Image (cartoon, coloured by chain):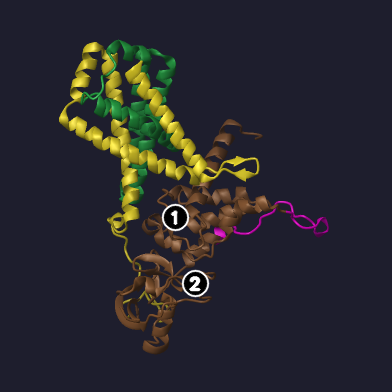
Chain colours: A yellow, B green, C brown
Amino acid sequence: MDQNHAYTAYHPRWLRPHVSTYWWLEKPAYLAFILREGSCMFVAWFTVYLLLLLRAIQQGQAAYEAFLAWSAGPVIVLVNIVSFAFLIFHAITFFQAAPQAMVVHVGHRRLPARVLLAAHYAAWAAASIVVFWLLTGA
Amino acid sequence: MLFSAGGVVSAMLLPVLVLLFGVAFPLGLLDPPDYAQLSALLANPLTGLVMFSLCALSLFHWAHRFRHTLYDGLQIKHLNEVIAIVSYGAAVAGSTLAAYLLWQLS
Amino acid sequence: MGDRITLQVARYRPEQESEATYDEFEVPCPKDWVVLDGLNHVKDRLDGTLAYRWSCRMGICGSCGMTVNGEPKLTCATFLSEYAPGPVRVEPLRNFPVIRDLIVDIGDFMRKLVRVKPWIVRQVEKPLSAGEYLQTPDELEEYKQFSMCINCMLCYAACPIYGLDPKFIGPAVIALAQRYNLDNRDQGAAARMEVLSEHEGIWGCTFVGECTKVCPKHVDPAGAIQRYKLSAAVDSMKSFFLPRGA
């Protein structure tokens, strides 16, 4: 206490614990949060991948074939498999968060969260089926 | 708002695209569309619009999350302006590239 | 297993030391005892110098929030038998400065709470002769959940953003602001918007969601914050595209 000239006898020093840079490793929920935010890196990666695909198509058939060959390389495939896992994680956590943010009223009643969640998953399934059909069937 | 729109759009469309163009086609599990089909598909203005929104919104979603995670999560506060410029700048650049390529393909 | 359990209680005696230490106490563990009963036993029989806050001992006053085995809990609502055979680590609430032993300074929260005007704000007062403000059960439902907050600050202890940046206004304050914004008797939403739309207002929140998980009254502050973010964003778009009217 004597070394604390800034404090009077009746205002002792308060303890202010410092938060570690690795705070997110302390609880599983914090780690899940950081992973969720980390999934955005894979969103960016795959958007870049799509831009590369678009550029290849714009450059012509040969470039497109070359892109398909490049995309079959083991490293790229591995990265894309991991991206797929993280994008699924992103979609699930994002849809989980949506009902908490959006309160939809139908007349006087509030739409239960399950209905909103189901609507998101239905839209996801529909969009996926349409894209799948466009790129493989038609 | 860009963040949530980007989150929804990327969640809806990117998984199936990764499954096809990232895993199924390269590994030969399914046949990729041939060049003519794909260019015809992309020439359609509706597809162009959807693709542009997908690319642009996903990039902005990433930029916002990336910036905030570095600031809040890893506490890199002293580089705040640099990170903001780099991430939003990259998003703008990517969106411009997407617009240009889709315009060329239509 | 037995009927005794060890409490590892954090101590901080600023007149003696500059760091926290831990004292161990063995207390009885009948099945209806909560952590607070254990602490009271310590204070009454084992070490009268232990300093901690408590009041109603029934989960309504919000005084007894502490960190129990790493989780923010109300010690009057946490059974000791849950942690058998122990030991049970009792520490002060995280993310707040510790004054002594288990007592934290909550001044920061109190100052932030006042800033959002947690009372009915009227632009035009109704005269007494016009009678009461009427509210239907549906209108009550709109904000009732957020009115359950007991200001226990467990949400602040759980929020990593508040831990990293104490300027963040925090979950409970935003939930309480929403409690009044969504009350149909209130006309103060614009005044609160100014405070909430600061950088350390709602925009500091990254929706980790821990606040909702630890809330003993199921207030769901994370939901309140995201809803407010959405309505704030919609309002700013409206004012951008439709400057007058709407």
Q: Is residue C208 left or right of residue C150?
A: left
Looking at this view, is C146 or C105 the one in front? C146
Q: Is residue C161 left or right of residue A86?
A: right
Q: Earlier in the sequence, mark 1 or mark 2?
A: 2
Q: Which residue is mark 1?
A: C168
Assign the magenta stretch its main secondary structure.
loop
Q: Chain of mark 1?
A: C
Region rendered in magenta: C114-134
The residue lying at 74 percent from left, 52 percent from top is C124
Q: Which residue is mark 2?
A: C63
Element at badge 2?
A: loop
Q: Quadrant of residue C42?
A: bottom left
Image disc number at residue A96: none
> Label 1 is placed on what type of residue?
Phe
Query: In the rendered structure, are the residues bearing label 1 and label 2 in contact, judged by CB atoms less than 8 Å apart?
Result: no
How many circles with numbers are drawn on the protein? 2
Q: Quadrant of residue C80?
A: bottom left
> Label 2 is placed on what type of residue?
Ser
The residue lying at 80 percent from left, 59 percent from top is C128
Q: Is residue C172 left or right of residue C43?
A: right
Q: Residue B20 placed where, x, y %?
A: 29, 26
State whether residue B47 is above or below residue A99. Answer: above
